[in-house]
Amino acid sequence: MKKILLIEDNRGITEGLCDTFTEPEYELLTAGNLKEAGALLSEHPGLVLLDVSLPDGNGFDFYSERLEKEKTPVIFLTARDEENDIVKGLELGAEDYITKPFSVRELVARVNRVFLRRKSDDSSSVIHAGSISYDMDKKEARRAGQVIALSSLENRILDLLFTNHDKAVSRNAVLDCIWEATGNDVYDHTVTVYMKRIRAKLGEDVIKTVKGIGYRVDSDEAL
C-alpha cells in the first residue's frame, strides 16, 4: 500500500484527494497545518504532498527542518506559479512541484511515478518498523531523525533482525551472531539480556517475540 501524507489547509482539495487516493492501493493521511503534520510523520509516509502556504508556517521551511533529514520524498502543491518558487522547491530536493488548480489525473500520475522510482531505487535500504527506521547501508537506527546510541554488538543483532525483516530469526542465530562478535562462550540467557537492552532503547513494540522460535521485526512495508 502506498502511504501518502497530504498537508493542505483547503478542505475542498483534501476531500477531493481523499476520494481519489483510496484503499487498497493507497493510504492517505491528512493534516490541515504543520503541527498536525509533524505528529503524523511517525506514520512514515512514503510520500508527502505539501502545500507551500499553510496557516502556521511555510512548506519550504517544514521540508528543510523535518523532511529532508528523513529523505522523505515531497511533491509541493501551491497556488504560486512564480519561477523562483518552483526552482526553490526543486533545489531543496523535492521530487516534483504542481500548481493549483491541478488535474487530479496528472497528480495521480506524478504520485505513482515517485513510488515507482523509489521502488526501483536501492536507496530503499532504509527499513521502517513503527517509530524506528534502520539504514542497512549505514548500520544505524533512528527515531524521529535522531540516531539511537547502540553498542557494536547491539547493532550487529539489530542488523541481523532487520536484514531478515518480516521473518522469524531463531535464538540460535542470535547466539551465533553474539559468538562471532565476541569469540566467547555464549549462553542462552545472554540473548535475553541483549534483547532486553535493545528493546529498552528502541521501544517494546519493534522486536516481536515469536514463541518457540525467536524474534521478528515487522516492517511497515509488509503491513
Image: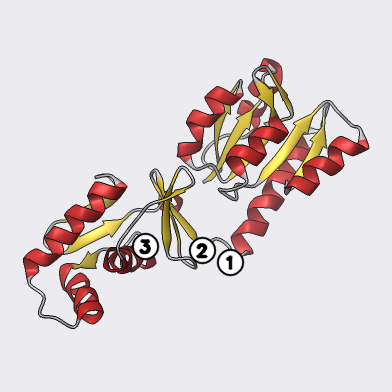
Q: Secondary structure at mark 3?
A: helix
Considering depth in this image, is 150 or 180 the residue closer to the camera? Answer: 150
Where residue 162 is drawn, which disc sits there?
A: 3
Where residue 68 is drawn, which disc sits there?
A: none
Q: Residue 209: in sight, yes or no?
A: no
Q: Residue 43: in sight, yes or no?
A: yes
Farthest residue toward the right? 83
Left/right of residue 28 with respect to residue 198 in the rendered view: right
Circle 1 residue: 122
Structural crowding at the residue carrying mark 1, measured as other residues with C-alpha within 10 Å and reported as few (<14), some (14–19) or many (≥20): few
In this rendering, is residue 92 above or below 50?
below
Left/right of residue 93 with respect to residue 202 in the rendered view: right
* Amino acid type for the residue under numbered disc 2: Ser
* Amino acid type for the residue under numbered disc 1: Asp
Q: Residue at x 58, y 39 (%)?
A: 66
Q: Secondary structure at mark 2?
A: loop
Q: Give the image quarter of residue 154.
A: bottom left
Structural crowding at the residue carrying mark 3, measured as other residues with C-alpha within 10 Å and reported as few (<14), some (14–19) or many (≥20): many
Q: Could you say where residue 71 lies in the image, as x and y percent from the top left?
A: 60, 50
Q: Secondary structure at mark 1?
A: loop
In this rendering, is residue 91 above or below 154?
above
In this rendering, is residue 186 above or below 202?
below
Q: Give the image quarter of residue 187.
A: bottom left
Circle 2 residue: 125
Q: Residue at x 35, y 66 (%)?
A: 159
* Amino acid type for the residue under numbered disc 3: Phe
Q: CA distance from mark 2 to mark 1?
A: 6 Å
Q: Could you say where residue 191 lies in the image, as x and y percent from the top left?
A: 14, 65
